[in-house]
Image: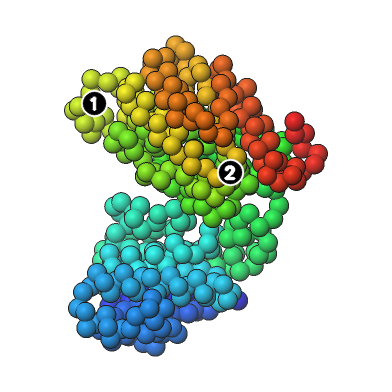
Amino acid sequence: MATVALVGTLDTKGIEYDWLRDRLLSRGIDVLLVDTGVIGEPHGRPDITRAEVARAAGTEVSELRAAGDRGTAVTAMARGAAQVVQRLYTERRMDGMLAIGGSGGTSIATRAMRALPLGVPKVMVSSMASGDVAPYVGSADITMMYSVVDIAGINAVTAPILANAADAIAGMAQGFATTPRAVRAADLGSGGRPLVAASMAGVTTPGVDAARERLTELGYEVLVFHTSGAGGRSLETLAGQGVFAGVLDLTLSELADDLVGGILTAGPDRLRAAGARGTPQVVSLGALDMVKFGPLDTLPERFRFRRVRIHNPSITVIRTTSDECAELGRRVAGKLRAAKGPTALCLPLRGLSTLGAPGGPYHDPRADDALFTAVREGLGGSSVEQVDVDTHINDPAFGRAAADRLHRLINKVTGGTSASAGAGGR
């Protein structure tokens, strides 16, 4: 039988959690109720008390009450809840997690959800789910449901929403509980074909698709991450966990957004995790010829003189300048120099994107040369392989060459045992 952990503040949401528990029990799901409240007395009897949660965070409920600081209490209980659910999962006592809440409850519960491995079912019903949920979701596979009204009692609006959430987690948990552990997403990288990460944007899709097809032929399973900010953060998180046999990071547009102020940045730590882990990586400079903003009417005035393109109704792009490209080259070089594992940089000399290919609106050899020159100078004397490829990034030949080079780097580390022997490696 599947078991769902219900994690929440039973002093403020106890009635709603009772309702959810009864709904899950009626669906044949066992329930573990975890109390993360601090101030008021809990409604009902939790299976894991607030005292246990607080101690998992290295404190006591009495200390949190005495401090009288809500922010401190929320942070501590979130830390403790993460420890508790990790332990429950490790002990195979839970198959999914469901929580409800406002801003505080959502912060606590999603911190715990982010501590669970990829693939473990996670559903969060929140009054915050209609806005920017990035701080709550991070790079985790959390299902966010908007509560429409505040979660304050069972009524004509909350009842069907909570019922849907309970039924959803019930189905997820049952499926997860009956899936052989060896093939769960939570055990990513534990067996089967070696995993390779690849970064891709719409403007680098043809080249990355060619690389992906070649890597599949070579015996790898390729996970493609959209360089949307969240995608880059997810790639970095999993690379830092050592999930990948190799990383094919051909699209670095998030670095341009981070430098210039675009909306799809993955933060300053993009392009660090694989190198820090020592994972073999092949990197290119895809889509560093552009910065992404929101709809055209949101484009800052100072950028309106640039070469502006409407990518779609939600995304407007501008061309990076020679000075920006030079700085991007220096940043890429600095990150690659710090890599502990085998690293290669492939430079597509004829363009960095569909827009930057010869004849395209962002074709700018001067700006591209500033990028190439800066990255070459920054890597001078390092162990990073530099490969000039006389084509644009979306030529299938470029993608296949990058894939073959990554295969060679991986085999250098593994002694030639990384992929199936009959895969046709060169």
How crowded is the residue under tag 1: few (<14 C-alpha within 10 Å), some, or many (20+)? few
> What residue is at 77 percent from the left and 37 percent from the top?
423
> What residue is at 53 percent from the left and 79 percent from the top?
30
Q: Please tell me which of labels 2 and 1 falls first in the chain.
A: 1
2 vs 1, front mark: 2
The amino acid pointed to by label 2 is Gly
How crowded is the residue under tag 2: few (<14 C-alpha within 10 Å), some, or many (20+)? many
Which residue is nearer to you in this view: 241 or 215?
A: 241
> What residue is at 27 percent from the left and 64 percent from the top?
103
- Residue 419 visible in this rendered orientation of the protein: no
Residue 35 is situated, as x and y percent measured from the top left of the image, at 37, 80
SS label for mark 2: loop
Disc 2 marks which residue? Answer: 341
Residue 393 is situated, as x and y percent measured from the top left of the image, at 53, 23
SS label for mark 1: helix
Q: Is residue 6 above or below residue 265?
A: below
Quarter of the rendering containing residue 210: top right
The amino acid pointed to by label 1 is Phe
